[in-house]
Each structure stands twice: as C-alpha cells, then as structure tokens.
Amino acid sequence: MADFWRDLIWTAVRDTTNTLSVVMPGVLAMLALVVLGAVLGWIGGALVRRLAHAGDLDRRSREWGLTHALARAGVYRTPSELLRLVVFWGVFVIFATMGIDALAIPGAPGATGMLMYLLPRALSALLILVVGWLAANFLGQAVLIAAVNASLPEARLLARAARWLVLLFAFATALTEIGIGRDMVLVAFGILFGGLVLALALAFGLGGRHLARHILERGRLRERVPSDRETINHI
C-alpha cells in the first residue's frame, strides 16, 4: 500500500515537473517581453515628449485651439503628454502580444500578426477622428459666426448641426477604415445624410415660400405696368 502511494505521488511530481519544464520557458519569455516592452515604451514616450517640447507643440496646440477642444471633451492632459502615452501603450501592447505568442497557447500565435494588420488601420482611423474633430470645431465656429452676422435666430442650432454632421462623417469614415461593418456604415450614413439634406431642403422651402411669392408678384406687376419710356416703332 505504501509503495502504491509513493508511486502515485512521484508520478504526480514527475508530471508536474515535465509540465513546468515545457511551460516555464514560454512564461519567462512572456514576462521578459512584457518588461522589455514597458521599458522601451517608457523610453520612447520620454523621447517623443522631449521632441514635442523642443518643437513647442503645447504652445502651438493652444494657438490652434487643440488644447481647448481636448478640454471640452474632458481631456485635460497636454498634447505632448498624450503623445507620450500613445507611444508607451503602443510599444507595450506590441511586446505584450509577442509575449502571448511566446506562450504557444492554441489560437494565440496569430495574435501578433493580427495586431500588425490592425495597427496601421487603427492609427489611420485615429488620425481621421482627430482631423474630423478639429474640422468639426472649426466649421461649427465658422457657421456660428456667419449665422450671428446674418442675424439668424437659430445660429447655435445651425452651428451644432454642422459640427455633428462633420463628426458623424468622420466617425463613419473611421469605422470604414477599420473595416467594421463597412456596408452597414455606408448605408446608415447615406440614409442619415439624405435625411438631413431633405430636412434642410424642406426647411428652406417652407421658410422661403413667402419670399418666392413676393418675387413672383413683383414680376407680374412689372409685366402689367406699361413702360413710360419712349419707344421707336418701325413703319
């Protein structure tokens, strides 16, 4: 009986040792890659922040209105700090994905390849959102100023509509760039844009019917009133 228990225990210990000898190299490689990614991400982020400070990015962002736009969205970090965080987390995620591949878990070896495939598209989508955000704020301010100068009663409403229209367009373009529901996004945006155009056409049509009637009445009056100018008729 004692031999049975001894063999059972030694078999369990031997199996555990064999399993650890197979798994531990992958775990150590993953930990090394994660630590290396954190260190390289911190170094890269620090270098990018120094370059941003050297280029006076924060002051230029305040002049361009980017800092104010970020504050309106609830982001109170400086653009240089945001760049540092983007670089740090980008490098860290890449090395962490490589560490997952090192574990050789079924289905995990393609994680790095998938990330490398999606990363450029994600960066492009992020750039589209940033540019769309800036363009939306600029267009909203421009529409607001133009509407106020034209003494329109719904100046703020028009400015918000223009801003959200540009934001929706940028969001739809970003989703299309990533490849998430491309056809659905295009159809939804087409329906939304068509509805907005139809609503604006109806609004201007109903609002301008009195002006159109006045123009037509003036044309008819001109036709009815005889001209006082002397005319020369051929004999």
Image (cartoon, helix red, strand yellow):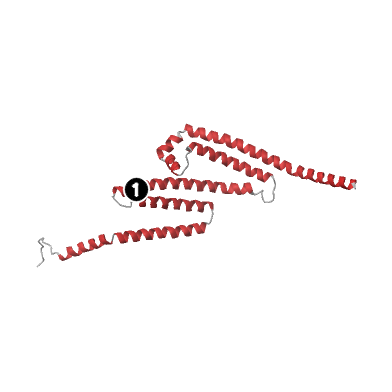
Q: Please give the name of the residue rendered at 64% of the width and 37% of the height, measured from the top-left corner.
A: 35
Q: Nearer the viewer, residue 3 or 162?
A: 3
- Tally of marks: 1
Q: Please give the name of the residue rendered at 51% of the width and 59% of the height, measured from the top-left corner.
A: 184
Task: Please tell me in which quadrant of the rendered image residue 21 appears.
Answer: top right
Give how far across and how far down residue 39 sits, in percent.
Answer: 61, 35
Query: In the rendered view, does 140 fall on the left or right side of 230?
Result: right
Give how far across and how far down residue 22 sits, in percent.
Answer: 75, 44
Query: In the rendered view, does 21 fall on the left or right side of 49?
Result: right
Give how far across and how far down residue 208 sits, in percent.
Answer: 28, 59
Give how far across and how far down residue 36 sits, in percent.
Answer: 63, 37
Element class at badge 1: helix
What is the three-letter code of the residue carrying label 1?
Answer: Leu
| In the image, farthest residue toward the front | 1
Quarter of the image with the C terminus in it: bottom left
- Looking at the image, is 223 positioned above or below residue 57? below
Task: Please tell me in which quadrant of the rendered image residue 92 appears.
Answer: top right
- The residue indicated by pointer 1 is 144
- Looking at the image, is 217 positioned above or below residue 91? below
Q: Residues within 10 Å of mark 1 (few under 14, many from 20)?
A: many
